[in-house]
Amino acid sequence: MKWIVAWVLAVAVLAGGCGDESVADEDSATATAVERPDRTHVADLVRSLNMGAYRNNDITHFEEVTRAPSDPSRAVSIVLGTVVDVEKGTAQGPAQDEDNPEAGGPLPFDTPDASSKSVHITVKVTEVLVGETAETIRVGLALPGSAELEQVKADLLALGTVVLPIYRSPVFDHDDGLYGIKRDGSLLLVIGEAGALSAPYYEADPEPLLVNTSTLDQLRARVG
């Protein structure tokens, strides 16, 4: 019943603000929304998913994603690549309980009133900065139920070359061939002119996150 556990985690992320490694703390400050010029359908979905979910998160700077996890099977690889395809994943309905024993997931992607959905992204890897991966990988991205596949696909295909901190996310344990992106997609980076890095899906001010890795050369030096 791995898929039940995995999708319970996904729903917790979407509904309760608990991401892949967040720690709830009512006394800590919720992330502050930042006016951003790089708004897209996917950016709005991922940012809304993560607002407040990482109030106690210990990833202050991007390069910290490479620290050894308590579970070695969850170790992070960092790859450069381009998105070549985006497909429907699955959806999640209401949580399973005594009053609704048939609930739970996964459900077909187009299920009406789904509480959450995932898309499966095919990425052609052009460089591996940390770890080992195949030349082509599949990456899952959990999104709110309002996600529109065609808009999501268009946004992701338009990103150009990206930096992905990927790992075996518990949200996608039901599919051995599917990676997750660290912090539920918010740490995806885009490579711009002269190797400048940006974090379009990061829910807060990205400047502190990239203070040591604002360019691809700086990132290579930090994690190499």
Image: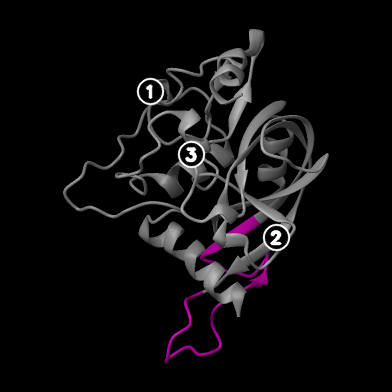
What's the distance in space between the residues labelled 1 and 3, CA to CA? Answer: 18 Å
Q: Report the front residue among 207 and 66.
A: 66
Taking the image as shown, residue 21 lies to the left or right of residue 146, namely left
Nearest to the eye among marks 1 and 3: give it: 3
Q: Which mark is residue 67?
A: 3
Residue at 51% of width from left, 16% of height from top? 214
Quadrant position of residue 134: top right
Looking at the image, the residue that sits furthest to the top is 194
Query: What is the CA distance from the residue labelled 2 to the residue labelled 1?
Result: 33 Å
Q: Is residue 105 visible?
A: no
Left or right: 198, with 175 as reference point: left
- Magenta span dominant secondary structure: loop
- Mark 1 neighbour class, 10 Å CA radius: few under 14, some 14 to 19, many 20 or more: few
Q: Residues within 10 Å of mark 3 (few under 14, many from 20)?
A: few
Residue under circle 2?
89
Tag 3 or tag 2, which sits nearer the N-term?
Answer: 3
- Callout 3: SS: loop
- Point out residue 202 in the picture as x, y percentages from the top left corner: 47, 34
Q: Start and end of the magenta stretch? A: 94-118
Q: Which mark is residue 208?
A: 1
Name which quarter of the figure residue 136 lies in. top right
Q: Nearer the viewer, residue 98 or 72?
A: 72
Q: CA distance from mark 2 to mark 3?
A: 29 Å
Query: At label 2, which amino acid type do we have?
Result: Gly
Q: Is residue 187 above or below residue 16?
A: above
**Of residues 180 and 13, the one drawn nearer to the viewer in this rendering:** 180
Q: Residue at x 48, y 82 (%)?
A: 96
The reply to whether the magenta stretch includes residue 22 is no
The image shows residue 119 at horizontal and vertical percentages of 67, 53
Q: Is residue 116 above or below residue 79?
A: below
Mark 3 and mark 1 in contact (Cβ < 8 Å)?
no
Q: Are marks 2 and 1 in contact (CB under 8 Å)?
A: no
